[in-house]
Image: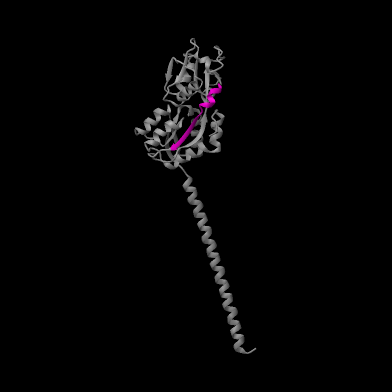
Amino acid sequence: MTRSVRTRSLRSVQVAALGAAALLALSACSSSDDSSSAKSGASQSGSGTKVSGDITVFAAASLKESFTTLGKDFEKAHPGTKVTFSFGGSDSLAASITGGAPADVFASASPKTMKVVTDAKDNADAPATFVRNQLEIATLPGNPDKVASLKDLTGKDLKVVLCDKTVPCGAAAEKALTASKLKLTPVSYEEDVKSALNKVVLKEADAAVVYRTDVRAAGDKVEGVEFPESADAINAYPIALLKESKNTETAKAFIALVRSAEGQKVLTSAGFLQP
């Protein structure tokens, strides 16, 4: 082999070696950049899910026990947060929201009362149903009046309490009574389900048509009587982020907890039905 040929061959090997080295360096640099990007993305994702600060949740009275538990769970999982609740009749809460009351989340006991808020465009996202609830008759402990059906409540000697017809539990009771072609004259109409139940707890009434969740929450202070007509008057509960929320990330995180498997476990154990 001549000297010129050997020189050209040596140069070719050197060029190939340099090219390979450059390719390895570029690959290493690229891997380093990808790793940094991944770490950066993970960091951003982590910071995006971190929540803090206060939120106010307006919720139907029947959610009091369950949401109080979930509020404590939320604060424990997210140190530095505080969840303040305002429980009441869904119609009153909806009116307060459309009237400008500051709140971050609204959990209603019926689509109808949520519609008051969405019609006013006071919601920030579409409401989502997170549970359902069914009616039950609450009687005095031991059921001394032997109430066994919805029809039994029409007896003249019984003092029966209903929720006001503008409240979801009252609207559901009215629907069940109408479907059964029964007419009931209560001694009073109450502003929310807790007020109706409390009349029986205080022995100011013999019976009340409330939610099964409220009967369960009352423990041995009342006795529950199921009635088949309640299956035709089940209320869906929607929840939504509100437009005027001052802490949307924390509010969204609370809604996520309510709709999560953990939240559903708390709610179903209280007697709510799955959505």
Rendering coords of residue 157 (x, y %) = 49, 9
Q: Which of 23 and 258 is in front in this view?
A: 258
Q: Which part of the image, by quadrant, shows the N terminus?
A: bottom right
Residue 185 is inside the magenta segment: no
* Residue located farthest toward the left when viewing the structure as drawn: 99
Q: Foreground: 245 or 79?
A: 245
- The answer, for residue 217, to whether it is visible in the render is no
Residue at 55%, 36% (x, y): give it.
262
Residue 11: quarter of image: bottom right
**Residue in the image at 40% along x and 36% along y:** 118
Can see residue 171?
yes
Q: Where is residue 216 in the image (x, y as percent from the top left)?
A: 54, 23
Q: Where is residue 226 in the image (x, y as percent from the top left)?
A: 56, 21
Residue 87 lies, in percent from the top left, at 43, 28
When the figure is inspected, residue 205 is found, relative to residue 272, above or below; the finding is above
Q: In this view, does 141 lie above or below 7?
A: above
Q: Would you say residue 232 sits in the magenta stretch?
A: yes
Vertical placement of 22 versus 253: above or below?
A: below
Q: Which residue is drawn at 51% across and 52% down?
A: 42
Quadrant for residue 10, please give it.
bottom right
Which stretch is magenta? 227-240
